[in-house]
Amino acid sequence: MDSGNAAWMLVSASLVFLMTPGVAFFYGGMVRAKAVLNMLMLSTAALAVTGVVWTFWGWSIAYAGNDIGGIFGDPGTGFLLHDVITTDNGIYTSIDTNATTYPHIIDVAFQVTFAMITVALITGAIAERVRFSTWMLFVALWITFDYAPMAHMVWGGGLLSPTGAISQWIGTAAHDFAGGTVVHINAATAALIVVLIIGKRKGFGKEPIKPHNVPFVMLGAFLLWFGWFGFNAGSAFAANGTAGYAWVSTTAATSAATLGWLFTERVRTGHFTAIGAASGMVAGLVCITPAADVVSPLAAMIMGAIAGCATCCACSLKFRLGYDDSLDVVGVHGVGGFIGTVLIGFFAAGTGLFEGGDWRQLAVQIVVALCAIIYSAVITGIIAFALQKTVGWRVSERDEVMGIDMADQGERAYDFAGMSTAILKEVK
């Protein structure tokens, strides 16, 4: 056991956990004041429900072994984590093997935070109009039948892994360092499917729906960037040079993406906006995630710049195509994740088309990305449609107009009436 690696992985798990509160602030600032508490609560449910599901069977499906068809692991092998924990003189500790240099239970901690942030990303697409109770049910079902199997397929030795059937068929190993497919393509596809099923917000495309708190958005973006160092550098699974390089490539790509978004926005609208800067940061983080360990510093910045420009343009497609992805999950995470996954085929050291490789790395990246889209779309569609037909997704139109915070949480983020009364009393 290496105490340095153990400490780094615990820190990384904590950093990734921080990303879900970061998403809560990022999305919370983007919605109207009458829905900010609900946005924060949706992320709270992502944390709480996922934590329970992961402990019971999510970990087992994703990583505990006994592969079933290359799609998921046996949910009983690691049920309630009995494959990784034991007691020593009445104290619970980790069952360790020679395969890792840190306690195996730390893997459970690290991986559950990935599950939490992935499902939390979906909340940005469904803002201001879904029932909190339905969302909690969705989280439990989606982690069980979508996220955990996807993690198994890509990172648990399944169908889409470097040693899986797709890689063997094409003749080169698919690469997803920290979640281009498992996290971003998966969440964005799910977000789009849910949005198509539940429909648009009242007034979408007809009246301006503006962010109520831009500083919240910026705070969330900075927290995400900070947490992403655990997300990417932590995916080296050691305190080593790969972790250090992933930190650097993540920063280079994110910086370039922020500039790419801002300059694209300047050309299109004449302004460098704070919302644009925050969104550009996230686009760059998303794009470099699958590639942080295999692309050069120059390639990382090129990828980031491409992602910044492309996602800035992609976010306006929802108005042309008529789907209400409230806070641009599809435009940022879907497009950014797909770009990052596919560009590995051009820029990966030794295997990319521009780095001495051939067509096979590009082919396997495209096929794996498409498989992730198809799987997520099918499973999410079944879950979301079933919930629509049973418990229902939407709050009433009246509750949506009056504010989902009062309808679902029974409280408001800002007591404007109370503030006005207090001011009047002071004046008198």
Image (cartoon, rainbow, N blue to C red):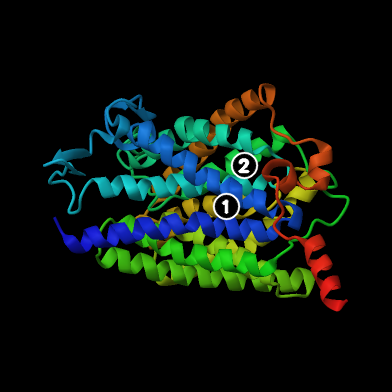
From this view, report whether residue 73 is shown above or below residue 253: above
Circle 1: residue type: His
Residue depth check, mark 2 versus mark 1: number of the one nearer the observer: 2
Whether label 2 touches label 1, CB < 8 Å: yes
Quadrant placement of the N terminus: bottom left
Residue, disc 2: 191
Residue, disc 1: 333
Quadrant placement of the C terminus: bottom right
Which residue occupies 34% across, 68% down?
Answer: 245
Which residue occupies 33% across, 61% down?
Answer: 11
Q: Position of residue 227 (x, y in %)?
A: 44, 62
User: Looking at the image, is mark 2 or mark 1 earlier in the sequence?
Assistant: 2
Q: Where is residue 392 in the image (x, y as percent from the top left)?
A: 69, 28
From this view, report whether residue 74 is shown above or below residue 252: above
Which residue occupies 67% across, 72% down?
Answer: 274
What is the crowding at mark 2: few (fewer than 14 residues within 10 Å), some, or many (at least 20)?
many
Any part of residue 181 in sight: no
Q: Where is residue 58 in the image (x, y as percent from the top left)?
A: 39, 34
Residue at disc 2, secondary structure: helix
Q: Which picture quadrant has residue 400?
A: top right
The answer to which of 45 and 424 lies nearer the viewer is 424
Q: Which picture quadrant has residue 154?
A: top left
What is the crowding at mark 1: few (fewer than 14 residues within 10 Å), some, or many (at least 20)?
many
Side of 95 where 61 appears, left or right? right
